[in-house]
Amino acid sequence: MASSSSGSTANRPSPAPSLATSTASTETSASGPPAVTNAEKGPDDTSKLKTFLSILRKFVGVSDIASVRFSLPAQLLEPTPNLEYWNYLDRPETFISVGESEDPLGRMLAVLRFWFTKDLKYVKGKPCKPYNSTLGEFFRCNWEVEDTAPAIIGPAQKLTHTPSNVQSSKPVKVSYLTEQTSHHPPVSAFYVDCAEKGISARGFDQLSAKFTGTSIRVIPGAHNLGIFLTIHTRGNEEYQLTHPAAHLGGILRGSLSVTVADTCFVTCPKSRIKVILQYLEEGWLGKTQNKVQGVMFNYDPENDSKKRIKDVPDKDILGTLEGCWWDKVYFTLAKSSEKHLLVDLTPLFPIPKIIPPIEQQLPNESRRFWTDVTNSILNREYTKATNLKQELEERQRDKAAARKAANQEWQPRFFTGQVTPAGRPELTREGIEALRGLNMGNYNLQESAVTGA
């Protein structure tokens, strides 16, 4: 993120600086794939998309292809577990800074800065299809980042749970735990915790997708109510960030791309501030703009009726937003014409995760669970990878049939319910201990008594 913006510098908002990536990372697997023995010729991207399209055409008219959970051949997959791929911490330094400002509007702007950086993987990379998660599969990791992102407006206070007489220059650690809690429908729960800064986030991830014949429209599933972010050091100030619909296009052209044309919301009942964000998809002659505009305003949580930017009365407006969510986003405060830089995505890339060594992962932990399939794909042994993948999927079906015959309901290990409480998953005792261990660098866990695959 840029360290300066145009205009005067007196009492002006400050965008976050660009930060270096984490100094420690095990983003790659602890042990590489075995030597290639039966390598097959891998398809190029165009061939992959043609094969993918031929499969998708079978689902034209299906209301939700995400719920069908169809199995793709291994050569069409990215060798990455779904639970590892889906997270919202591409730039964790923006997450740990959301509570710094003493100004409620400043904290909302910091939450928006986090929002625009959370999906850098789509801005900097190409869309891909990771493995389908299996029931009971889980993933955990840490990030370590420097706490140098400034408050955007208002005086700042570096809130921390570290005793005031302890001065530490160590990076701040953010811990992440996610588990596939339901298979029908496919739902995973996640929890993000920064114990040092007193900030957490949680939610259920579920997608609903429909193939239109030329693109795939992806919307949040019924159990996906967004990200619930809580600043515990600000009296448990909670923000709900809802997800917009997106389109995966370029299938016919052989070049996948993600576009967004929808409205989403960020609300904070405690500060009574709401944001409406409107994403604009295509402009003149179909050229993708990736534009976003928004309004920040005072609202009544008990009568939350404003859904469109034009419906917000001028007297309630605190500021506006505009820009390109692939590039730079600016904000302008009410009663001012000066634009300030909120975030510049140009120099930013996802920060690597710190993942437990493979030998300390459990059999149903994502990296270890899929390791044979991953190694086979990396070695271009696609037939072997497809067979291994199908064996895992068949094992999951067999265990599901056994549970049904015994009239047993699946119970997640780290979260209290498959899809409850609504929108805000709660950790079990084991989930709390797993996150605490992550934060302390202790990866030891007992093997799961029951697994879904």
Image (cartoon, helix red, strand yellow):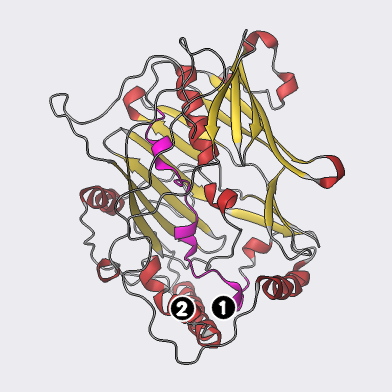
Query: From the viewer's perspective, is residue 101 above or below residue 196?
Result: above
* Image mark for residue 249: none
Tell me if residue 273 is in the magenta stretch.
no
**What residue sits 40% from the left and 75% below the top?**
371
**In this view of the protein, which residue sits in the foreground, 47 or 183?**
47
Residue placed furthest toward the right: 285
**What residue sits 47% from the left and 37% below the top?**
228
**What residue sits 73% from the left and 20% below the top?**
311
How far across and how far down the image is residue 84, in percent?
Answer: 44, 59
> What amino acid is labelled 2 in the image?
Val
**In this figure, which residue is indicated by the disc labeled 2?**
373
Local secondary structure at mark 1: helix
**In this figure, which residue is indicated by the disc labeled 1?**
74
Left or right placement of residue 309 versus residue 76 in this view: right
- Please identify the quarter of the rendering in which residue 304 is found: top right
How far across and how far down the image is residue 378, in percent?
Answer: 48, 77
| Crowd around label 2: few <14 · some 14–19 · many ≥20 (10 Å) | many
Give yes or no for contact between labels 1 and 2 (Cβ–Cβ under 8 Å).
yes
The mark total stands at 2
How far across and how far down the image is residue 193, in percent?
Answer: 34, 42
Query: From the viewer's perspective, is residue 216 above or below residue 197?
Result: below
User: What range is drawn magenta here?
Assistant: 70-98
**In this view of the protein, which residue sits in the foreground, 435 or 406?**
435
Query: From the viewer's perspective, is residue 8 above or below residue 267?
Result: above
How far across and how far down the image is residue 191, in percent?
Answer: 39, 46
Tell me if residue 75 is in the magenta stretch.
yes
> What amino acid is labelled 1 in the image?
Ala
Q: Is residue 275 visible?
A: yes
Residue placed furthest toward the bottom: 38
